[in-house]
Amino acid sequence: RRVNGRIVYALYDSYREPAREGAKIFAPGGARSVRGTELDGTFICLLLERSHMQYAVEAHCDGFYSYFASPISWGSTPSNWAQAAGFAKSHSLIFAPSVGPGYVDTRVRPWNGAATRERSRSRYYDQAWGSALGAVSAGAEWVSITSFHEWHEGTQIEPAKEGMRDGAA
């Protein structure tokens, strides 16, 4: 997607590389910087732990997103979103809390049943949006939806069945 004419890159597991390595790519003047090139865009890091907000600053990312549609990490817990939004705002970063209609990833992570969140006739999705709008009130500018291409985790918004690709049955 493009926002304000720039491609948005959601960097999953960005924290696995040291922030100094990210800075080589995302800082203007970094050793391998993409800034000002045809690869430039808006780069948002994954926010799992509270410390990942500072990681985004040090890696010269443009912000961070929570990704998981279940409160399984500090970043995906809605009660922390106002703090994340405040940090982002104070550092001129983007914060995108992530919402989803439910969460079941046991097909790909059989050991992770505790993260399951039932749809509950869309009440879970409504509650997630309520939490995200609270983060927007605290300064978050974006909301991401963890659903697209996540049908294998049971989080699709529209019903899907196995074997479907790009909307074709």
Image: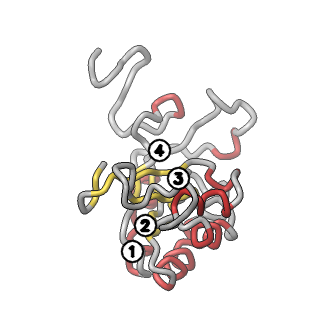
Amino acid tagged 3: Tyr
Mark 4 neighbour class, 10 Å CA radius: few under 14, some 14 to 19, many 20 or more: some
The amino acid pointed to by label 1 is: Val
Residue at the left extreme, as displayed: 5
Q: Residue furthest bottom?
A: 90
Asked which quadrant contains residue 21, the reply is: bottom right
Question: Distance of mark 3 from mark 4, alpha carbons?
Answer: 17 Å
Foreground mark, 2 or 3, reads 3
Local secondary structure at mark 3: loop
Q: Are marks 3 and 4 in contact (CB under 8 Å)?
A: no
Q: Are discs 1 and 2 less than 8 Å apart at CB?
A: yes
How far apart are the two marked residues, 4 and 2, measured between alpha carbons? 17 Å
Local packing at callout 2 (Cα closer than 10 Å; few below 14, some 14-19, many 20+) is: many
Q: Position of residue 121 (x, y in %)?
A: 40, 45
Q: CA distance from mark 1 to mark 2?
A: 6 Å
Task: Give the amino acid at mark 2.
Answer: Ala
Q: CA distance from mark 1 to mark 4?
A: 23 Å
Number of the label disc, if any, that sits on residue 136? 1
- What is the spatial separation of the Cα atoms under label 3 and label 1, in whole angstroms? 16 Å
Camera-nearest residue between 25 and 18: 25
Q: Quadrant of the C terminus?
A: top left
Which badge, 2 or 3, comes first in the chain's sequence?
A: 3
Reading the image, the residue beneath label 3 is 67
Q: Which residue occupies 71% across, 58% down?
A: 18
Q: Nearer the viewer, residue 79 or 74?
A: 74
x and y percentages locating residue 30 in the rendered image:
55, 63
Which of the two labelled residues, at mark 3 and mark 4, occupies the earlier sequence position?
Answer: 3
Residue at the disc numbered 2: 132
